Amino acid sequence: MRLMACCAAGAVVAPCALAATVAPGVDLGATYSQDLFSDVGGGLRHGTAAPGAINLSAGIDGRVWGGSADNRFYFDYLGTFGSSISNDVGDLQGLDNIEARNTTKLYSAWYQHDFGDSGLMIRLGLQDWNALFDTLDAAGVFINSSFGLGATTAISNVSQYPTTAVGAVVRWQSSGGAYVMGSVFDGVPGLPGHPAGTHIAFRSGDGIFSSVEAGISGDGDKPYKLAVGGWYQTSKYDDPAGRARDRDHGFYVIGQQRLLGGANTPKLDAFAQIGGAESDRNPLNRYLGGGFDVTGLLRRRPNDVLGLAVARAHVSRVFRQATANSDRAETAVELTYQAPINNYLTVQPDVQYIINPGANRAVDNATVVGGRVSLTW
């Protein structure tokens, strides 16, 4: 069943290194993120876990060989380690977005070409679909995986953290902020049964994962975004009832808006996520998420971010019929505070309350406390 595989992965964009320009056309970066969480009440069992991740990145553009910066190569090497807090809690959505199997792998290796001022871009290679699709800046502060990638999309065979696939993306954006983009990816990221290391395999039955997203966004004092997207896959898999399938599709609607604030006052942003997938073949068929974050609430700490958000993943009827003690949904509530100490160090205490972990009536609601420390170079 695909549900546990994708949710254990965390369904999130890999942490991006803070790139430093070492020469014209060459950017290098590294990020080390260390989490520590304890299940202090409810869940499958009380316990403490410490997932971690390291990213090493390099970006090289055409200026290196006397060409244009419109031609760019990007490489990202990922290392994941530590223990699993979701194994203690038993949640479906993945409460820690860097939690993954202990391994090292080539995470990204792609080429991008921007067609001058036309607004057109193509990206080819090993890449994270969620780096461009179904993503909101206002939701990026949160640690629960569903705020990075909606749960009904995360259950698909989409190329996502920590295992990516080879794909092609085309994007066009107007000067006014309207955009449309589409993608085609290998239908099965990595090599099933071999989660460690880097595997790029094109096998019979993999099929394809394709998607399209259209929206409008804006920056400035009042940043906003509104987008709608859909995905379709043809890879072979078994549904929760054990039936063989080779087709699946879903949709999502995402948006964010700055509600209050300016250059010298605290900024209040809100975001919302809606997602859906076919009810007769997926463990999750509906998803709803949303929240608020405040930047600069304390005058002396203008870059601190306080966030509160809720993610609800609805379980399909076919999953409930095939799974004992299953309830209708799992809901995660997260309260977090991200505090940059300097240009290199960030600390982030975090509390999550998981209602019906695993959508299982037999498991008590879980309270999870902990946080994240990140170092960037």
Image (spheres, grey):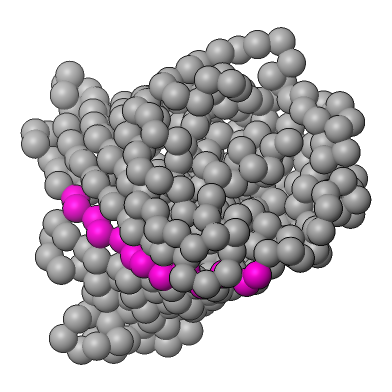
Q: Is residue 10 above or below residue 40?
A: above
Magenta-highlighted residues: 364-376
Q: How many labels sit on residues?
A: 0
Q: Is residue 173 visible?
A: no
- Name the chief secondary structure element in magenta: strand
Q: Quadrant of residue 273?
A: bottom right
Q: x, y (%) of residue 259?
A: 48, 84
Quadrant where the image shows the N terminus:
top right
Decide if residue 272 is on the left or right side of residue 85. right
Q: Which residue is drawn at the image coordinates 12% and 34% (left, top)?
A: 24
Q: Which residue is drawn at the image coordinates 16% and 24% (left, top)?
A: 64
98 vs 166, nearest the viewer:
98
Q: Which residue is drawn at the image coordinates 43% and 20% (left, top)?
A: 198
Q: Is residue 78 above or below residue 310?
A: above
Q: x, y (%) of residue 15?
A: 35, 47
Decide if residue 227 is on the left or right side of residue 37. right
Q: Is residue 283 above or below residue 315?
A: above
Q: Which residue is drawn at the image coordinates 17% and 32% (left, top)?
A: 26
Q: Quadrant of residue 29?
A: top left
Decide if residue 273 is on the left or right side of residue 320. left
Q: Is residue 186 visible?
A: yes
Q: x, y (%) of residue 204?
A: 71, 10
